[in-house]
Image (tube, grey):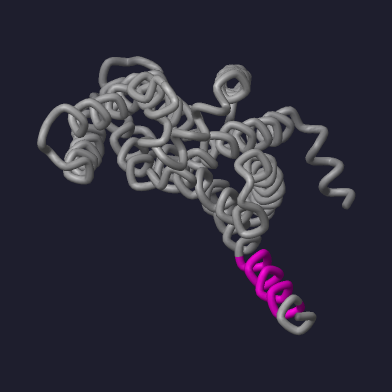
Amino acid sequence: MNEIIELLNYSFFQNAMGAAILASISCGIIGTYIVARRIVFISGGITHASFGGIGIAWFLGLNPILGATVFGVLSALGIECISKKTDVRQDSVIGILWALGMALGIIFIYLTPGYAPNLLSYLFGSILTVSSLDLYLLSALCVLTILIFAFMMRPILYMAFDEDYAQTHDTPVQFLNYLMIALVALAIVLNIRVVGIILVISFLTIPQTIANMFTQDFSKMIFGAIGFGILGSLFGLFMAYKLNVPSGATIIFSFVILFIIAKLIQLSLLKLKRKAS
């Protein structure tokens, strides 16, 4: 307990905790849409495609997260546009951009003269090194996400569960598709510093899946996902510090442990209901 109190006095750990909470809020909201809409594979494609932006930005001497943001959003819009306006299947487009992004990232990083960056920090995250700028960006993402969902909850809900039904209720389906996929891309790239490229998709799906075990209500799922996200990310953060391992891996490991515990609780509740009936 004393060690935890001492850790809280360090600014780098305070920043890490702030990033974990902000990431849980943004991923909790957007991830609920991803799970309900069943577009986890699209999110995985955007995640890996964004690595191309990191490599290009590093080659040009720019901020890698800026490069990932531009490349990730363009990849997301490209997936949506090409799959809707051509006869190329969506999963094929995702696979192409997935592979292209990873390939471009590796090529440009190794073409850059001088010291190559530690790829593990981008692949698996480094939450203990987040800066004040990262916190501002994550805060802005949270505010933007909350505002969009607050003012457009009903059409987003229609889109998440039945796009055809949304069209019959005069929902701007095409606009919402582009808006939401761009928001998904922003959530992915801005959370790369927290859990990394490889593991960010789990941050967007596991807490939401846990919440979905106990409720089918979209709004309750959002709050549940945020709660499980904060609990798992903070526990994983302390574990990463204690074991001196990449924080992204320990955060996702914590999520999986929570998932197992939640599943056991769910099965126990089902058994009690069956006995009672």
Q: Position of residue 223 (x, y in %)?
A: 69, 40
The answer to which of 218 and 77 lies nearer the viewer is 218
Image quadrant of residue 145? Answer: top right
Total count of labels: 0
Q: Residue at x 82, y 33 (%)?
A: 9
The answer to which of 274 and 77 lies nearer the viewer is 274
Q: Residue at x 57, y 27 (%)?
A: 153
Quick check: is 243 in the magenta stretch?
no
Quick check: is 265 in the magenta stretch?
yes
The answer to which of 114 and 44 lies nearer the viewer is 44
Note whether 191 is above or below 35 in the view shown. Answer: above
Q: Residue at x 82, y 46 (%)?
A: 4
Image quadrant of residue 243? Answer: bottom right
Q: Main secondary structure of the magenta part?
A: helix
- Give the residue furthest to the right: 2
Q: Residue at x 37, y 19 (%)?
A: 175
Q: Is residue 226 in sight in this rendering? A: yes
Image quadrant of residue 115? Answer: top left
Q: Position of residue 53 (x, y in %)?
A: 30, 26
Q: Position of residue 209 (x, y in %)?
A: 56, 54
- Give the residue furthest to the left: 87
Q: Position of residue 179 (x, y in %)?
A: 41, 21
Residue range corresponding to the magenta coloring = 260-272
Q: Is residue 64 in sight in this rendering? A: no
- Give the residue furthest to the front: 168
Note whether 7 is above or below 245 in the view shown. Answer: above
In the rendered structure, the answer to whether residue 154 lies left or right of residue 265 reads left
In the rendered structure, the answer to whether residue 177 lies left or right of residue 78 reads right
In the rendered structure, the answer to whether residue 153 lies left or right of residue 18 reads left
Image quarter where the C terminus lies is bottom right
